[in-house]
Amino acid sequence: MTISPLLLCNNFLNKSLRDGYEITPMKLQKLLYFLCREYLQKYEKPLITEPFSVWQYGPVLESVYMEFKSFGAKAITKYAKDAQGKSLMVDEDSFPELAQSINDVWTKYKGYTGIELSKITHKPGSGWYSAYQRHDPIISKEDMMNDRVC
């Protein structure tokens, strides 16, 4: 099972509204990276349909960037929409493994800012750092599997 990153965005944005934590585009990108990294490490299968690009401030999913770039460094105030203009999210009740991973990442990182999360992704040993050192444009599955930076 691989999922569109935009569906997962809405799961995090829903938690953000429920719990009162703002999510900026940068923070959302890093939450998605940590989710995909932890899911890949735990279940040894990729979660999403798109690779993470190596950008200056850390891992980035280009589809997520395009969807939320209008918010700049401000909190996101809308859900991602599909081609028909509908806002959908992953039904966590139908995927308990994924729900547990989302909740683990949210619990651990919800209080961090996007800048703080970016600094975590830049630490030596992170998937981003490994790809960046090799001048790779994307973070490989192997880099994510070997990423133990918290």
Image (spheres, rainbow, N blue to C red):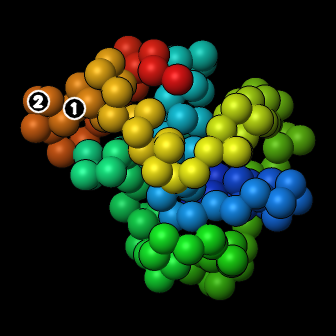
**Residue 17 placement: quadrant:** bottom right
Check the image and report above or below for 2 versus 42.
below
Q: Name the foreground residue: 70 vs 6.
A: 70
**Residue 42 placement: quadrant:** top right
Tell me: 21 left or right of 118. right
- At x 44%, y 33%, the residue is 120
| Residue receiving disc 1 | 131
Image location of residue 47, percent across then percent down: 55, 37
Q: Quadrant of the N terminus?
A: top right
- The answer to whether any part of residue 143 appears in the image is no
Question: Given the image, on which type of amino acid does mark 2 rest?
Answer: Arg
- At x 19%, y 36%, the residue is 132
Tell me: 30 left or right of 107. left
Please tell me how crowded label 1 is: few (under 14), some (14-19), or many (20+) other residues with Cα within 10 Å.
Answer: many
Count numbered badges in the picture. 2
Q: Name the foreground residue: 149 vs 43.
A: 149
Callout 2 secondary element: loop
| Residue receiving disc 2 | 134
Image location of residue 102, percent across then percent down: 72, 38
Callout 1 secondary element: helix
**Identity of the residue furthest to the left in this view:** 135
- At x 50%, y 29%, the residue is 37
Tell me: 70 left or right of 12. left
- The answer to whether any part of residue 113 appears in the image is yes
Check the image and report above or below for 57 versus 64.
above
- At x 34%, y 45%, the residue is 58
Image location of residue 61, percent across then percent down: 40, 55
Tell me: 74 left or right of 128. right
Question: Given the image, on which type of amino acid does mark 1 rest?
Answer: Ala
Please tell me how crowded label 2 is: few (under 14), some (14-19), or many (20+) other residues with Cα within 10 Å.
Answer: few
> What's the CA distance linking mark 2 and mark 1?
5 Å
Q: Are marks 2 and 1 in contact (CB under 8 Å)?
A: yes
